[in-house]
Structures are given as structure tokens and as C-alpha cells.
């Protein structure tokens, strides 16, 4: 099937939560647009996560403002499928013009005329504007130190599904952010011998004085922080909504049976070495944990909040043996470790976006998502406008800002040179959705201003 649409005012690439939020705001403001998604709506929540994953934040928090999770305890943690369904329902709510199963392969700025030419898997589109909503976590990254030994099964956390998927034997999980820590916990509970390589991390309490950490980060203004504090580029956050939600406590994981090790340094066939930084990393995580309790107490005091005291939250368990006598190297073969899971994060891939919107290191150059190349917008990237930008609740607000910017630009252009733009929506007649796809509007149905 070909995309018969030849021209559109605003093209949104990707229909994860960012694309859906963008479409809602553009629809509200009457901006003709189309969302192209190469797979399905919220595909990464369906197939880019492990089977047991639940949201890290409770349902009252990890959602868009205009829809609650249906028939769901707002304090509970939605499963990845429920999150995906939530976005499908959300898109249906305002009849989002999303076309699934179409990949955007190339975007180039037009020479000598406005707009962009967009090559897709189903034809070429002209667009005045392109919103890049292809995700904060696109390409799994495995560091170059990964061993070449054929005796080891190695996967990225993006490809981890469940313990049964791995061959018999122990597992080294490298990376102790929310993914690594949850996967290590699941594997250990499934009876695996687990080594967890722990780097710098924050570990907020799941809840304190009767409020979830998402609430505390909100009222303390932490989600709204506009820039990352210097030197924290490699500090990950370790939180978990698994099993009803709990505070990530590395000592507890060790007492449960997981062997903690420092940062993974190098491999020599099946021998691996670790940095001597485990205790420091854990202690810095404790400092972060305790500082949030302090800030929460101060907030409660200042505002006269009658929240139950929780002094026991300050009890830190004794250091486990793996902290007091840390391992600096390990022979994986000898210890029966057969798999490595790299929970080492993601990179972005904008090779298809051939426009002047990047700095000399290839990073998107933008202000709150408005790229230096006029007409290009980025949405959903970490720290796009603030700490919450790559998260469910945060992306919705960034999308609103971008939609406002688009409307303002359209007004400027409409005033002087409307005839030059792709305003002729009569060319956008027949875009039919194939069975099983989202319905796609004719733009004329959506109101053009
Ligand atoms: C393991 C994990 C757990 C997370 N848990 C939470 C959580 O609990 N709460 C929370 O708020 N956040 C969470 N996040 C962070 C964030 O909410 C998710 O990463 C979310 O998927 C980001 O949504 P997005 O729409 O920006 O990007 P994505 O979900 O990645 O969506 C981008 C879409 O673009 C499509 N696409 C990409 N390239 C093209 C192209 N060229 N043409 C057409 N389509 C394209 C993709 O198929 C994809 O569907 C989690 C992230 C991870 C990795």
C-alpha cells in the first residue's frame, strides 16, 4: 500500500507516548498533522521490555493529565501491557491521526523552498514541520569491553524477557539502574546465582511518610530541574514498582543472595575484573537516599504537613560480606556463570534525519525541543526541558510547549506567505488504514486554521 498523502503541515515521527501527546496538543490547536509509526502504538512498551516489567511510578503519576488508568488502583503499578493499552486508548480518545506500520527513512530540508521531503517505507511526503518523537532509548548500548568468549550468552537488557530465556547457570548483570537491579532481583528469585555490577546511582525511597517518591520529587521541584547537576552524567536511578513497589536497597539484595561487585572494568576471555568502587558507590547512593528523607522532612515541617513520622526509614542494614570483602575479579567459567546481561543503557540514532539540527558531536541542538533547524522539533529526549522530559508525565508538557511554538510559527507564515506553504489540504484526500491499523484522518476532517 502506498501513502497517498503527499503533503502535510506537521509530521510526527513515532507513536510512543511522545507521539501520542504531540498529536493530542496539535489536534486541540487545529494543526493538520500525521503521526507515522513503524510498528504499533507504544511498541517499545510491548516488545522492548521484559515480561514482568511494571511502571516505575504509580498509576496516578505515570499517566497523562487527561485520562486515568481504567479500573486500576491509582497507587498500583501498571504492567507494561497496561501502559501500552493506555496509550492506545488515549489515542482513540481524540481519534489521533496515527498511521502504523510506516517507517520514516529519510528527512531532508528542501532547497530553495520551505519544508522537508520525507522518505517513508510507503512513499514520499512533503512536510512543513517534523517532530522527532522516536524515543529517548533507541539503540541498546553494550560497551566495547564485552568479551568475545563463545561460552557466554550475552544480551542487552532490552532483549531480556525472563529467566527461562537464559541457559542454565549463573548470571552477571552489568549496570544497576532500574533495569539492572530489577532483572538481577528477578533472576536471583528464580534460583540463579547472580553477580550485580553496581556503579554510581541515586536510589530514592519508594515511599516516605506515606507518600510515594514520585510525589516527593514533584513537590520538591526535582522533576522540574532544568539541567543535570555537573558530574552526574553517569549517575543512574534505581527504583522499582515490582511486587507492589519497594525501595531499592543494595544491601538487602546482597543479604538476599546477590553478590554485588564494583564497576565492570575488563574481560580476559572468561575472567572479569571489577573496580574497587563498590562501597563508595553504595555509600553515595545512601547519601542520595538520606538527602531525600531530609528534604522531605524539611518540606513537611515548613508546610505544617501532618504526615506520619518514619524514623525507621533511616536504618541502613549492615554491610554485607560482598561489600566488606569485595571481589575484584572473577573467573566466570569456574563460577558457573553462563550469561551476561548488559543493563548499560541506550543511545539515539538520528542517521535518517539529514538536517542541520545537531552539534559537532552529533547531539540534537535545541531549546526545549525547538531545534536550531527551523521546522524541526525533538520530543521525549532525556532532559529536553527538565528532568521529567523522558518520562510519561513530563513528555506531555513538553509536547504542549512544542505545539504552541508550531502554532505561533504557523501564524507568522500565514500572515505573509501562506500561499507558499503546504496548506492545500485537498491534496490530502485518501489515507485509509489497513485492517488492524489505527484509523487515519483526512486532514480536512481535523480542521485547518
Ligand atoms: C525499561 C524501561 C522502563 C521504563 N519505565 C518507565 C516508567 O515506569 N515510567 C516512565 O514515565 N517512564 C519509563 N521509561 C522511560 C520512558 O517512559 C520510555 O522509554 C518511553 O517508551 C518513551 O516514550 P517515547 O514515546 O518518547 O519513545 P518510544 O516509546 O521509544 O517510542 C518511539 C516510537 O518511535 C517509533 N520509531 C522510531 N523510529 C522511527 C522511524 N524512523 N519511523 C517511524 N517510527 C519510528 C518506534 O517504533 C517507537 O514506537 C522506561 C524506559 C525503559 C527503557
Image (spheres, rainbow, N blue to C red):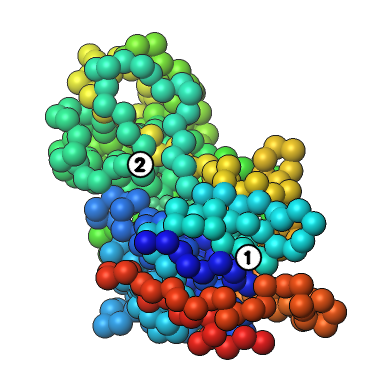
| Image quadrant, ligand 1 | bottom left
Looking at the image, residue 128 lies above or below residue 273: below
Query: Residue at position x 22%, y 28% from top?
Result: 170
Front in this rendered view, residue 168 or 89: 89
Query: Residue at position x 85%, y 79% from top?
Result: 416
Disc with the residue nearer the chain's start (1 vs 2): 1
Q: Which mark is residue 157?
A: 2
Question: Is the residue at mark 2 in contact range of ligand 1, meaning its CB lies under 8 Å from it?
Answer: yes
Left/right of residue 14 with respect to residue 79 in the rendered view: right
Residue 433 on image: x %, y %: 36, 72
SS of the residue under disc 2? helix
Query: Residue at position x 47%, y 71% from top?
Result: 20
Do tag 1 and tag 2 residues touch (Cβ < 8 Å)?
no
Q: Residues within 10 Å of mark 1 (few under 14, many from 20)?
A: many
Residue 327 on image: x %, y %: 37, 21
Residue 103 visible in rendering: no
Q: Tell me the distance, in whole angstroms, between the alpha carbons under discs 1 and 2.
A: 36 Å
Amino acid at each position: 500500500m502506498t501513502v497517498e498523502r503527499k503533503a502535510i503541515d506537521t509530521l510526527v515521527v513515532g507513536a510512543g507516548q511522545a507521539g501520542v501527546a504531540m498529536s493530542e496538543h496539535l489536534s486541540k490547536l487545529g494543526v493538520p498533522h500525521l503521526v507515522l509509526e513503524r510498528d504499533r502504538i507504544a511498541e517499545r512498551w510491548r516488545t522492548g521490555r521484559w515480561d514482568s516489567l511494571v511502571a516505575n511510578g504509580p498509576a496516578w503519576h505515570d499517566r497523562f493529565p487527561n485520562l486515568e488508568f481504567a479500573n486500576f488502583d491509582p497507587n498500583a503499578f501498571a504492567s507494561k501491557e497496561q501502559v501500552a493499552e493506555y496509550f492506545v486508548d488515549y489515542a482513540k480518545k481524540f481519534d489521533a491521526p496515527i498511521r502504523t506500520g510506516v517507517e520514516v527513512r529519510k528527512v531532508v530540508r528542501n532547497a530553495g523552498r520551505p519544508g522537508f521531503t520525507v522518505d517513508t517505507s510507503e512513499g514520499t511526503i512533503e512536510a512543513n514541520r517534523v517532530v522527532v518523537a522516536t524515543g529517548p532509548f533507541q539503540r541498546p548500548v553494550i560497551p566495547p569491553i564485552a568479551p568475545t568468549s563463545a561460552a557466554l550468552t550475552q544480551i542487552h537488557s532490552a532483549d531480556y524477557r525472563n529467566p527461562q530465556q537464559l541457559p542454565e547457570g549463573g548470571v552477571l548483570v552489568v549496570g544497576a539502574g532500574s533495569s539492572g537491579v530489577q532483572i538481577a532481583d528477578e533472576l536471583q528469585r528464580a534460583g540463579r546465582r547472580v553477580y550485580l555490577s553496581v556503579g554510581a546511582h541515586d536510589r530514592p525511597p519508594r515511599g516516605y511518610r506515606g507518600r510515594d517518591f514520585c510525589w516527593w520529587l514533584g513537590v520538591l521541584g526535582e522533576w522540574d530541574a532544568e539541567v543535570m547537576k555537573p558530574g552526574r552524567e553517569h549517575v543512574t536511578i534505581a527504583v522499582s514498582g515490582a511486587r507492589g513497589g519497594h525501595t531499592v536497597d543494595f544491601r538487602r539484595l546482597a543479604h538476599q543472595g546477590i553478590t554485588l561487585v564494583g564497576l565492570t572494568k575488563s574481560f580476559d576471555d572468561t575472567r572479569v575484573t571489577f573496580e574497587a568502587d563498590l562501597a563508595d558507590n553504595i555509600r553515595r547512593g545512601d547519601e542520595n537516599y538520606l538527602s531525600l528523607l531530609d528534604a522531605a522532612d524539611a518540606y513537611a515541617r515548613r508546610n505544617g504537613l501532618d504526615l506520619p513520622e518514619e524514623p525507621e526509614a533511616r536504618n541502613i542494614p549492615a554491610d554485607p560480606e560482598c561489600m566488606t570483602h569485595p571481589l575484584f575479579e572473577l573467573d566466570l567459567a569456574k563460577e558457573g556463570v553462563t550469561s551476561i546481561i548488559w543493563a548499560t543503557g541506550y543511545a539515539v540514532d538520528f542517521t535518517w534525519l539529514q538536517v542541520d539540527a545537531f552539534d559537532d558531536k552529533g547531539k540534537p541542538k535545541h531549546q526545549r525541543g525547538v531545534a536550531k533547524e527551523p521546522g524541526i522539533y525533538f520530543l521525549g529526549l532525556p532532559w529536553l526541558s527538565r528532568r521529567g522530559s523522558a518520562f510519561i508525565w513530563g513528555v506531555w508538557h513538553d509536547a504542549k510547549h512544542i505545539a504552541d511554538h508550531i502554532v505561533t510559527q504557523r501564524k507568522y507564515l500565514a500572515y505573509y506567505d501562506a500561499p507558499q506553504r503546504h496548506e492545500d489540504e485537498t491534496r490530502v484526500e485518501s489515507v485509509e488504514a489497513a485492517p488492524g491499523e489505527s484509523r487515519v484522518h483526512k486532514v480536512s476532517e481535523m480542521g485547518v486554521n
